[in-house]
Image: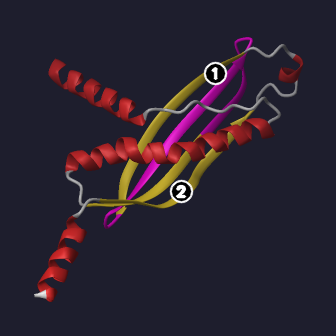
Amino acid sequence: MAENTEATAATEEAAAPQLALQRIFLKDISFESPRSPMVFQEEWKPEIGLELNTKSRQVGDALYEVVLEITVTVKNASETAFLIQVQQGGLFNISGLDERQLHHALGAFCPGTIFPYARENIDALCVKGSFPALMLAPINFDALYLESLQNQQAQATEQ
């Protein structure tokens, strides 16, 4: 009887949804300041542009790589002061989710987990380039994910 209870508990645990962060890593990073040192002699009125993308792929049994790509372009007086590109990655062990839940985890939860690391790298590069600190505001990846789904559904209906 005890063996049946243990076997049932082990089966239920194996089928239970699991999502575990295995590793955070820096995949690619770039800093460019094409107008240095002249940019430091100008009045500083920055215009900040932000591009954000995510990619995910399965790399093993229940193991997924998620990469958050962020490009920050800062212009001063309509000319590029600096450009930072970061690809921050994470390895996640994910099992027991249906297709919809997996898609949501890879599109919202995992990028949200990686974002603080990318944000710190962007800030550090900015400061090392001798520019004022640039701490990006938190991003609601759930809202971005839902917006992306709505856009995909709208495009599918138009076709």
Tell whether 58 sits left or right of 51. left
Residue 144: image quadrant is: top left
Residue 137: give x, y in percent of width and height. 57, 30
Residue depicted at 51% across the width and 47% down the height: 114
Q: Secondary structure at mark 1?
A: strand
Position above or below: 77 against 67: above
Residue 19 shows in the view: yes
Residue 48: give x, y in percent of width and height. 63, 21
| Amino acid identity at mark 2 | Ile
Task: Decide: few, some or many residues near mark 2? Use Cα within 10 Å; few <14, some 14-19, many ≥20.
Answer: some
- Taking depth in this image into account, of 73 and 15 the one nearest to the observer is 15
Q: What residue is shown with label 2?
A: 24
Give the label on residue 16, or none: none
Q: What residue is shown with label 1?
A: 48
Most common secondary structure along the magenta stretch: strand
Tell whether 84 sits left or right of 1. right
Residue 4: give x, y in percent of width and height. 12, 84
Residue 74: give x, y in percent of width and height. 68, 23
| Amino acid identity at mark 1 | Ile
Q: Secondary structure at mark 2?
A: strand
Could you give the CA–CA distance between mark 2 and mark 1, rounded to whole angstroms? 26 Å
Tell whether 152 sits left or right of 125. left
Q: Which residues are magenta?
A: 60-85
Quarter of the image that includes the C terminus: top left
Residue 159 shows in the view: no
Task: Decide: few, some or many residues near mark 1? Use Cα within 10 Å; few <14, some 14-19, many ≥20.
Answer: some
Residue depicted at 64% across the width and 45% down the height: 29
